[in-house]
Amino acid sequence: MDFNLPNALTWARIVMIPLVLAVFFLPAEVLSPHHQNVTACVLFVVAAVTDWFDGYLARRMGVTSAFGAFLDPVADKLMVCAALVLLVWLDRCNVLLAFIIIGREITISALREWMAQLGKSRSVAVSFIGKLKTTAQMVAIPLLLFQDDLFGLPIHQLGVVLMWVAAVLTLWSMVYYMRKALAVLSEK
């Protein structure tokens, strides 16, 4: 295992997952519901920002590694899945949307592993639609964690709309990746 700053940031992201969850288990005397929302939102945003920084720093510092390439998407998926389960538990996210997103993450991870075993991992490399899906998720989740209106903006409603957008993009990207994989498999 390579220990460097980008991998340390990825590990920090993984460590932040239980912290985001734990915030909502603190008694109201310790952290009011509003402060729980703000704290969870800030922790999630910090974790999401480290996702961008770890990849940027790994490329900039020339310390990309197979371990980092493995750990980064695992951290992303753990972070998103944990947040979605939490949001369903808090009744802030539709369970069907969470199921679609989590189911897609598992399916595409398995597909990528299978294609890698066939030596065709490039055929299911991250696409623009996948990046749009991730962006929609990474904006929707903090909005739903924050929950309260801000400067007159209906933050929760914006989060709900973006979560629906993320679910549509999730299905679209899954179809895209499946079609790419089927094209490769039909060649054999």
Image: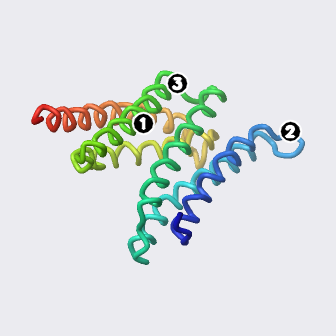
User: In whole angstroms, how far apart are the C-alphas of marks 3 and 2?
Assistant: 25 Å
Name the image quarter holding residue 86.
Answer: top right
Give the residue type at disc 2: Pro
Of residues 143 and 176, the one nearer the viewer is: 176
Q: Name the element at disc 1.
A: helix
Identify the residue position indicated by label 1 in the image: 105
Give the residue type at disc 3: Asn
Q: In the image as oriented, which residue stretches furthest toward the bottom?
A: 61
Identify the residue position indicated by label 3 in the image: 94
Which residue does the image show at 41% across and 60% down from the upper left? 66
Does label 3 or label 2 sit earlier along the sequence? 2
Q: In the image as oriented, which residue stretches furthest toward the right?
A: 29
Of residues 3 and 80, the one nearer the viewer is: 3
Does label 2 or label 1 sit earlier along the sequence? 2
- Disc 2 or disc 1, which is closer to the eye? 1
Q: Are marks 1 and 3 in contact (CB under 8 Å)?
A: no
**Percent x, y for residue 159?**
51, 38
Which residue does the image show at 49% across and 38% down from the upper left? 158
Identify the residue position indicated by label 2 in the image: 27
Give the residue type at disc 1: Glu
Q: Name the element at disc 3.
A: loop
Of residues 84 and 149, the one nearer the viewer is: 84
**Percent x, y for residue 35?**
75, 47
Quarter of the image with the C terminus in it: top left
Label 1 neighbour load within 10 Å: few <14, some 14-19, many 20+: many
User: In whole angstroms, how far apart are the C-alphas of marks 2 and 1?
Assistant: 33 Å
Say whether residue 32 is left or right of residue 139: right
**Percent x, y for residue 103?**
43, 28
Which residue does the image show at 54% across and 37% down from the upper left? 81
